[in-house]
Structure formats: structure tokens, C-alpha cells
Image (tube, grey):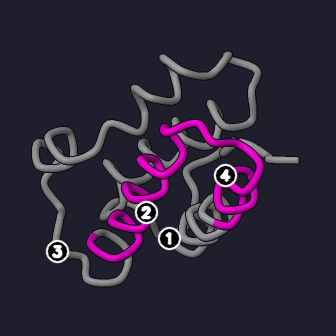
Amino acid sequence: MYKRFTDIPTKSDYRKVVEDTITYIETISINDNDSIFPYILNQLKDIYKEVIIENSITESEDIYDRYDIGAIGVKYFDEEDEMHKRLCDIFYGTVHYNELK
């Protein structure tokens, strides 16, 4: 069960959510052939590499141009769905990553 960010997360909290969500989607996509899951997975892996590991994407405009997982979360999943919550939180964390402690 996913627990939403109630406060501004730390970088390690955020990293853990991204890692857990990658694992979660890999597990879901084994039994679900929806083409949205590989697309989301590619974005999450890119976020993990470019934002968390390399810290090479820091400008919010670049993040808005490159990633649309927040919009996917809103458009494709119900508000109470765990995937909706995860993707919206991850997008928030991606935009504000450099501000996290």
C-alpha cells in the first residue's frame, strides 16, 4: 500500500518511492499488456538516471518538456488509484528534487 507524501520528502524518501514504483510497474506489467506501463517505466528509469543519479536535469521547464508522468497519472488512473498517487508524487518530486533535503 502506497503512502503519499504528507510533508516535503527527503531525497532518500523520493528515491525510494521511484525505486519501489519501478518494481511495482515491472510486476504489474507482467500480467497487464497495456502499452502505458512500458512508457511509464521508461520515464521512471530516465528520472532515476538523469534526475536522481546524475542530477543532470534540474530546470523545471526541462522537466515539464521531458516528462509527462504526472499528466498520465491524472489522465489514465482514478484519483484513488495507487498508480495515480505514485505518479503525481513522483512528478512533484522530480520538479522539486533540488529543493529536497
Q: Amino acid at mark 3?
A: Ser
Q: Amino acid at mark 2?
A: Leu
Q: Which residue is mark 1?
A: 11
Q: Does the stretch in magenta take in 3?
A: no
Mark found first going from the N terminus, 3 or 1? 1
Circle 1: element type: helix
Question: Which residues lie in the magenta part?
Answer: 23-50
**What is the quadrant of residue 16 in the picture?**
bottom right
- Position of residue 75 in the picture relative to residue 50 (left or right): right
Mark 3 crowd level (few <14, some 14–19, many ≥20, 10 Å Cα): few
> What residue is rendered at 48% in x and 52% in y?
38
> What residue is rendered at 30% in x and 64% in y?
98
Q: Does the stretch in magenta take in 27?
A: yes
Q: Find out whether the residues at labels 1 and 2 contact each other: C-beta distance under 8 Å.
A: yes
Q: Main secondary structure of the magenta part?
A: helix
Q: Amino acid at mark 1?
A: Lys
Mark in the foreground, 3 or 1:
3
Residue 75 screen position, x and y as percent: 48, 17
Q: Which residue is mark 2?
A: 100
Circle 3: element type: loop
